[in-house]
Image (cartoon, rainbow, N blue to C red):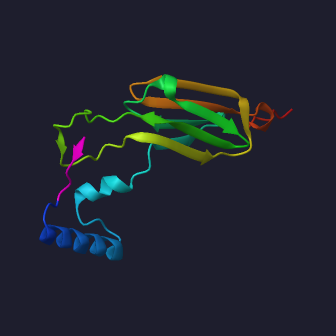
Amino acid sequence: MVTTLFPTNLFEEFDRLQRELDRLWSGWPAAIRETALDVVYPAINVGRTPEAVEVYAFVPGVDPAKLEVTLEQGVLTIAGERPSSIPENDQVTVYANERFAGRFKRTISLSEDLDPDKVEATYRDGVLRLRIARKAHLQPRRIEIK
């Protein structure tokens, strides 16, 4: 596979280097395209209800059979591999490749009040949903007054 990245001449390379240094010193990306390069994959949402913690991992293009999800000592791990969308062809010249491809592993520390034996996992439309129930004796409950 032939991969050609812009810039293609020396002056453009110096210009890119200057933009990169400016981005590092300013803390802001020099171009919109550069913001996607600093993203952790997969993106996740984590929420809590009185009964459970829900984690949504956004993994489009990943075969759910190839995802590995573990929960050990309060640490949730989501691992897998996202295949490349670029064809394996010597005739293809790539000018930009911003879509993440390759192996990934994401870990999340969760609270100790969760029950590792009560985890539900579903996958739909590229979204992995995990529901981890809280331990029954630690859930909030209403006290009846007599």
The location of residue 146, given as percent across then percent down, is 86, 32
Residue 61 falls left or right of residue 109:
left
Q: How many labels does the image show?
A: 0
Residue under the point 22% across and 44% down: 2
Residue drawn where x is 21% and y is 68% of the image? 16
Q: Quadrant of the N terminus?
A: top left
Question: Who's the residue at 66% across and 44% down the image?
Answer: 75
Quadrant for residue 33, please give it. bottom left
- Residue at 26% across / 36% down in the picture? 86
Say which of 57 and 38 sits in front: 38
Q: Is the magenta stretch mostly helix, strand or loop?
A: loop
| Closer to us: 106 or 74 | 106
Image-based side of 5 in relation to 73, left or right: left
Horizontal and vertical percent for residue 106? 54, 44
Pick the front one: 27 or 7: 7
Q: Give the range drawn in magenta.
A: 1-6
Residue 38: name its quadrant.
bottom left
Q: Quadrant of residue 110?
A: top right
